[in-house]
Amino acid sequence: MTVINTRIHVQTRGNCDFTDITEQVARKVEDSGVEDGTVTLFVPGSTAGLTTIEYERGALSDLEGMWERLVPRNIAYRHDERWGDGNGYSHVRASLLGASLVVPFVNKRLTLGTWQQLILADFDNRPRSRNIVLQIMGE
């Protein structure tokens, strides 16, 4: 069993910014030398999350609309009372989405569906510099 720890870096715009990180992750897996296994992705921080979706304007718009309906920006959040930074909604959204994903790979290729991409969702109310931790495990 081989375990490789690495990172990818993403600069985001915040405010429900979705970034396709599929190619960066695929490149790290391919360069790892591990043939078959899993890659675990984890985004440190409490205002971003990871998911999969078809990275297409309509689907992304639908996803953003869902977040606005489920966890709207324009209501009061107790977090904002304490810190005054106005991003209480981003913490709740990130908590619901989750900070990690596990993706299997075979022959150094991610086993994603044809229209399935790996997405970083940055919910914070400002641009951020994100480092996504990758742990590649396998043989």
Image (cartoon, rainbow, N blue to C red):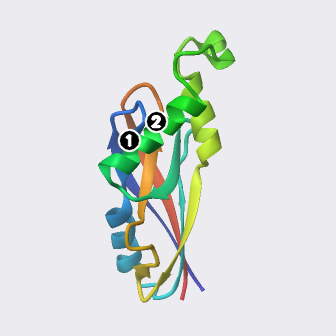
User: Would residue 11 appear left or right of 41 to someone viewing this image?
Assistant: left
Which residue: 39% across, 50% down?
59
Quadrant where the N terminus is found in the figure: bottom right
Residue 46 falls in which quadrant of the image? top right
**How far is the residue under mark 1 from the one under mark 2?**
6 Å
Whether 51 is drawn above or below 1: the answer is above
Quadrant where the C terminus is found in the figure: bottom right
The residue at which mark 1 appears reads as: 61
Q: Residues within 10 Å of mark 2 (few under 14, many from 20)?
A: some
The residue at which mark 2 appears reads as: 65
Q: Amino acid at mark 2?
A: Gly
Compare residues 88 and 39 and report the one nearer the observer. Answer: 88
Q: Residues within 10 Å of mark 1 (few under 14, many from 20)?
A: few
Whether 24 is drawn above or below 136: the answer is above
Q: Position of residue 110 (x, y in %)?
A: 43, 76
Provide the secondary structure element on which disc 1 rests.
helix
Whether 1 is drawn above or below 15: the answer is below
